[in-house]
Amino acid sequence: MAGEGLTRFWPLFDLVVRTPRLELRLPPRGGVCRHRRCRGSRDPRAGDHAVLPPLDRGRAGAARPRFGQWWWRHRAEWSADKWTFTGVAFVDGKPVGAQDLEATHFRAVRSVETGSWLGRAYQGQGLGREMREAVLHLAFAGLGAEEALSGAFEDNAASLATSRAVGYAENGEARGRRRDSSARTIRFRIAREAWERRRRDDIEIDNLEGCLDMFVSPLS
């Protein structure tokens, strides 16, 4: 957790989504560097993720500034009309991956999009699904979303399987940029009604009230 002085100006540091297996929260100040240590653990066959930054390619020295910029830009440009929350997934205090939740004009549209990556050493243990269910709980139960969208490159079998297992339905396809070319992506959507049928009762959200206005702009 961040110190009291830091959360006073950025209350998102206190937001935690907790499941029986993991915690999803922002890394504390200085935690970005420690979190990046698991960057090289994705399966390279899956290709780059369409939302999260390219963490596992390029020279380390060149990649570090881009990685820092990606995290800091989301904080600097955050507004209730356009935001990206990237929670780090912690298992027994150890960072294992990251889970995105982003939206534009959320109060009016009530639509979010998710994206994630998971360290290779932690794959095949159900943690990818646990992360997705945690962030969907934040979106639907915490923020009042009406739908959640996602997508993955067609060769990212793990991500496609997670979306289907959680209850998303296929929602078309698109071409997405991957490195210096493009690749086919499969799009997914889960509506509130579908999520409610699968809703878990063992996921908790701590300290959302103090930062709710950051996600949902007040009525003018």
Image: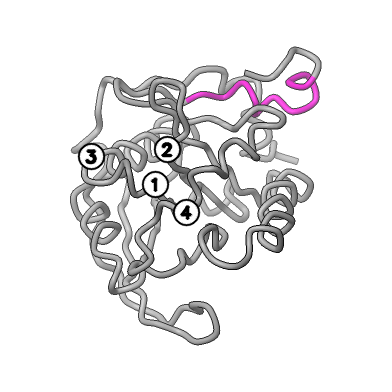
Identified by mark 3, the residue type is Gly
The residue that mark 1 highlights is 119
Name the residue carrying label 4.
Answer: 40
User: Residue 170 sits in which quadrant?
Assistant: bottom left
Count neighbours of disc 3 (C-alpha within 10 A) and say few if under 14, some if 14 to 19, many if 20 or more.
Answer: few
Q: Which residues are magenta?
A: 6-16
Q: Earlier in the sequence, mark 2 or mark 3?
A: 2
Q: Nearer the viewer, mark 1 or mark 3?
A: 1
Where does label 3 land, which residue?
A: 126
Residue depicted at 30% across the width and 24% down the height? 21
Q: Position of residue 144 (x, y in %)?
A: 46, 37
Q: Amino acid at mark 1?
A: Gly
Q: Nearer the viewer, mark 4 or mark 3?
A: 4
Give coordinates of residue 191: x percent, y percent.
31, 51
Q: Quadrant of residue 34?
A: top right
**Callout 1: SS:** loop
